[in-house]
Each structure stands twice: as C-alpha cells, then as structure tokens.
Amino acid sequence: MNRKSFIKGTALCGIALHAMLRNSLAATKATEKSMGVSLDKVQRVFEVGKPSRVVIIPTEEVMKKINSAKRVTVKCHGDNFGLGHDQPGMPKNSSGKEFPKDWKIRKEDKPYKSNKEIPFKIEDGKIIIEDLVFKREDGYAFVVKVYAPQRESFLFTVYAVDPSIRKLRPLKGDTHIHSTVSDGKNTPEEVGARSLETGCDFQSLSDHRKYDGSLKLQSAFDGLPISIKILNAEECHMSDVHVHSLFADRGVTPWIIANKDEFDEMCKKIYKELPEDLDEYSRKHVAITEAEFAVIQRFGGLAGFDHPYWRHRCDSSKNSIMKYLPFSILDTILKRKKYDYVEVANGCAQESTDLIVSTLSDLRAEGIDAPIVGNSDAHTVKGQGKVFSIMFSEKPEVSYLKDAILGHKTVVVDSASDLELKRPMLIGKRRFILYAYFLLGSYFPRHEALCAAEAKILKQIIKEGRKPELMEKLAKASKAVKEHRAAFFGMADDF
Ligand SMILES: [Zn+2]
Ligand SMILES: [Zn+2]
C-alpha cells in the first residue's frame, strides 16, 4: 500500500485504522517507512495507567511542513481509549457528564472514532505529548495532521501494556535444532551463528539423544560478547514418541542407559496406572514417554512433547507408508498432561500443526490447558528462522523462560507453512498475539537486522579466531542490539 492511499484510509475511516493495527504484520512493515516520522531510538512501549511522555520525531521534511503550517493537530486512536474524560486540561468529550437522554449512540461516542485533539508542544524538532495516560492494554496510533495548507497526515504507533507485563521483553527463541552432533548438516557453531542471524535472543541445540551438542556450542561461544544466550537441550526418544529435554542440567539419554533398572521400574509403575482397556503397545509407549518426562523434570528441565502429530514410516523400507502415531498413545499422553509443554509448530512436521492446535482446543474444553512452544527442528541452517517462539520473559535465563512457558506467555510464530501464507501464523493467547502483531511489525525487523549484523562478525570470528579488533566489533554490534531494545521499551536490559 502506498503512502497516499494509506493516509487517505486513516483520515477517512477509524475502523480501517483499527483493523490495520490489528492485522498489521505486513502492513506495518510497509507503512513504518512511510509514516513521516523517525522510528530510531524512540520509545514505543508504555505502561497502562502511568502518565507517559510520548515523543514523536518527524522527519526533517515533515518538520519543515510543520513549521510553516497553519495548523497542526495530534489525535490518538486506541480501542476504548477514552482520552479526555477525566484528565485535567484535556478537552471534554462531547458526551459530557450527562447521560444521553435518548439512548442513541452518537458517532462521536464510538471509541474508535476519536474526535479529541491532544495537547502537545514542539521542541527541538520533536512533537512532545506529556502526561498521557493509556487506559487499557492495546495498540494506539497517533495521527499528526498538518494543514500546510493542504492537509497531510502522519502516523506513529505505540503499544501500552499492563504493569503486570511491563518488565517482560519479547525474547525470540528456537529450542529445537540439530547439528552434526546428531543428524544435522551444520556444526554447532554454524547453527549458533545462524540462530543469532535470524534474530534469536536465545537458542538451544537439541541433538537426538545427545546433550553434548548444546554443551559444545555453549563452550565454543563462552566469553564472546554476544547478545544471544546459548542454553541446553536434548531430543530424547526411548520409544517412537519424541520428547524434549529443555534446560535440564545434564544429559537424559545417557542417564537412562546407565540406570536401566531404575528407568525400567519407573516405566512399570506408570504402566500399572494406565487404563487397562488401553492396548499393550500403547500402554508401553505412554509409560516410557512419561518416565522420560519424569527424568527430565528430576534434572531441572522442562519436559516437552515434540511434534505430536509427526508422521513416520511404518517400517524401514523406503516406500512404506507414512503414519501418525496411534491416537490412543497421543490422546493418553496429552490428557494425562505429565509433560510441561507441547510443541505446536515444527518446521519439519508442518501438517501436524492443524491437528495439535485443534486437539489442544478440544482439551481446553475439558479443562486441560497445555503451555505451547514452536521450533524450527532444523537440520540445516537454511531451515532455521522460519518457526520460533516469542517468550515474554524478563531475561533470557532458564528460570525466567520456564516461567514464560508454564505461564502461557509464549507466542508461536510459524512461517514455514507450505500454504504460502502472506504472513506467519501465530498461535497463543490473544493478549500476547495482539502484542506480538505490533512487535513483529515494529520491533523485530530492526532487532533482526542488528542481530544479523552481529552474526556476520561472529561468523568471521568462528573462521579467523578471536582477534582483538573483531572482538571489539562484536561487542559494539551486540551493544547496538541492547540499545535498540532499551530505547523501544523505554528501559535498559538488566541482563
Ligand atoms: Zn523429533
Ligand atoms: Zn528434532
């Protein structure tokens, strides 16, 4: 959409603007550039209920128009924003204090139809709005109208969040990736650098039955001033069910092999608890899977149920038919909920997303609400970056990320779909999806570009070694990632 038609749209129709805020993934990307305001180093996330200072920096060209304009107005469009009702100095809403006698809803009372101008001042080439109170968690659009003498509009979008989630940052992570330590095509270092290149704030390698891959990467990047956190994981499978050991403090598969008798006992105990009408094959699979979950949790990890609806060959012959695991196994595991989270999107098992999302919706109707995560499950660096999770967490550290997952503060972003969607599919709680729409349009593009610049230097270091000049460059690039985040969220990282 070009600027002209966008501006026309916003000027004429509050609903169109509102819809645009809602579905702004691709749209925001296109319009951010054409807003006529600078978006570099500007705070875009504010706290609901707290008097805020909103600073809009017009481009030089727009500022010239503002300086010679007959009139400049600023209006703020937000869902149910209600600005002006009870703030001192704000113009009163036309509905006043009186309740309309005839119950007729007037045009100007519609929350999306903002007729209220906001007081502002212009200082040092900036439009400054002081002590603005955002009343509810939502996205807001400031429309600056310049009558110079023809009317032109410029747009600046922000998001206001509840105090309860104000400290949380949208941390991008991929916790299911393979390297040459198992069947992946790239070395742990190559995979780690690629994670950074795709804008991940944290990642964990999860080689098949091997915890060592994640350890190897951790030690390879140890001491480097990078903005990505390298965490531990392992993909376990003592049966046909794939299980994720996320953030455990040691390898699970080696422990099971070394403690076979104890593991067998755990399996037998679970087996006895399972419904007797469940067939022998399913009972065994469920028992082994749940015993794996228990070992992972014993070692401080989160137990994930990986790609539940993946399809695998029925036997070793190449032409054998591909099948889901028996639903008796899947349903029993999902309903008993001994896992900590379910992987709902997986870059390698794309068709299974529909089924697991619908299954989780069925389970919610029964009172079972499973936390969710999405991952690339990439086996090559090319496959990384298409599926990931945004975890709303204070820090990219294990205890905080665990809280984000278990507290349902994750949004799964899936753009690996073979449906050729124009934008990624988002899965999660509505509250966080709405926030993620804004962030994917306004925060992540620059974050990703800065991370990619950092990854370029990291790759050079992997190749040429830790030369002082490269280390210095890397530290600078990593600082730029942090500075962008600090400016955008209006608070510095404490990690
Ligand atoms: Zn797997
Ligand atoms: Zn895998």
Image: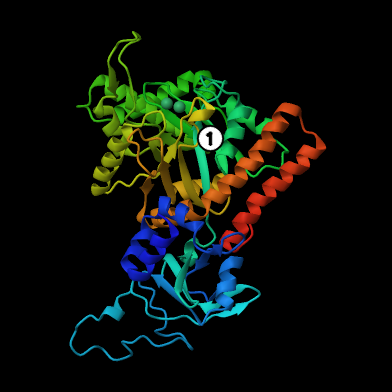
Amino acid type of the residue that numbered disc 1 sits on in the rendered structure: Phe
Q: Residue at x 32, y 35 (%)?
A: 419
- Left or right: 92, with 361 as reference point: right
State the residue at coordinates (67%, 32%).
459
Helix, strand or loop for disc 1:
loop
In the picture of the structure, the residue carrying the numbered disc 1 is: 299
Instruction: Choose top left, top right, bottom left or bottom right for residue 140.
Output: bottom left
Q: Residue at x 55, y 47 (%)?
A: 399
Q: How many marks?
A: 1
Quarter of the image with the N terminus in it: bottom left
What percent of the width, then of the height, locates residue 268?
36, 24
Residue furthest front as drawn: 149
Q: Which quarter of the figure has residue 103?
A: bottom left
- Check the image and tell me how it is coloured: rainbow
Relative vertical location of residue 395 with respect to residue 259 in this rendering, above or below: below
Question: Is residue 269 shown left or right of residue 466?
Answer: left
Residue 133 seen from this side? yes
Front one among 13 and 103: 13
The x, y position of residue 369, in whole percent, is 33, 47
Vertical placement of 381 versus 51: above or below? above
Where ligand 1 lies, by image quadrant?
Answer: top left
In this view, 486 is above or below 66: above
